[in-house]
Image: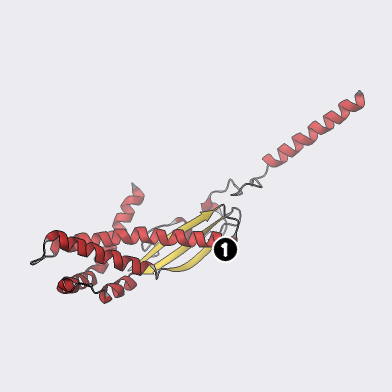
Amino acid sequence: MKKMQAVLLTGTFAVAALVGGCAGQNVQQGGPLARTDTPIQEVKDLPKWVTQKGAAFSGERRVLYGVGNSAGIFNPSLRRKAAEGQSRNDIAATLQVYVAGLQKQYMAETTAGSMDKSTTEQHIQDTFKQVTEATLVGAQIVEYWENPIRNEAYALARLDIEQFMDIMKSYTAASGQFKELDANLREFVRKNADKAHGELNEELDRRKKS
């Protein structure tokens, strides 16, 4: 009987020691994210861009950036692909705000001539949509970082507004009736690119503070 009690006590101490040891660790092994108690901002060698989003946070003019991340993906190739895809999605959201600002300004200034207003608006919307989609294809992944203590990755995408400008300049509508309108639109974009970019940064700052 005493021998059995000794065995039970030994087993109890072993379980207690195991639980205590696990509680003392910051990382919980086995989970898909390998959870830690360390905030991302305190991870050693964390790139500054990981915690930033939106337009030209580096101080560059006429440049857009997007930050994307992926977590819980064990396949390295898929993890990187997912993070890069999210960074491009982030750029797309920012570029849409930029384009919306240009479109609003242009519609306030343009005259449709003999064309009805709805037709003009629809054409301008379609033009910006096509130019935006073509521009996003050229977005470059310029940085990639993996969290050393957690199964997650981050990617930084960069888009030069000059690309948008170049595609805008080369755009031509299939219908000849919009030839003059397209020329005016391209010239407007060229003259107002910097202004729209500045307003974009102001808008993003307001969103971050709200």
Give the left or right position of residue 185, taking residue 28 as reference: left
Q: Helix, strand, or loop for circle 1?
A: helix
The front one of 82 and 61 is: 82
Q: Position of residue 38 (x, y in %)?
A: 57, 48
Circle 1 packing at 10 Å, graded few (<14), some (14-19), many (20+), is: few
Which residue extends farthest left? 114
The residue at 48%/62% (across/down) is 84
Q: Position of residue 72 (x, y in %)?
A: 57, 52
Quarter of the figure that contains the N terminus: top right
Please say whether residue 15 is visible from this viewpoint.
yes
Q: Specify the quadrant of the image occupied by residue 43.
A: bottom right
Which residue extends farthest front? 175
Please say whether residue 60 is visible from this viewpoint.
no
The front one of 20 and 180 is: 180
Give the left or right position of residue 47, taking residue 5 as reference: left
Amino acid tagged 1: Ser
The residue at 30%/73% (across/down) is 167
Give the left or right position of residue 193, taking residue 149 as reference: left
Q: Position of residue 183 (x, y in %)?
A: 18, 74
Q: Is residue 186 above or below residue 122?
A: below
> Dot 1 corresponds to which residue?
77
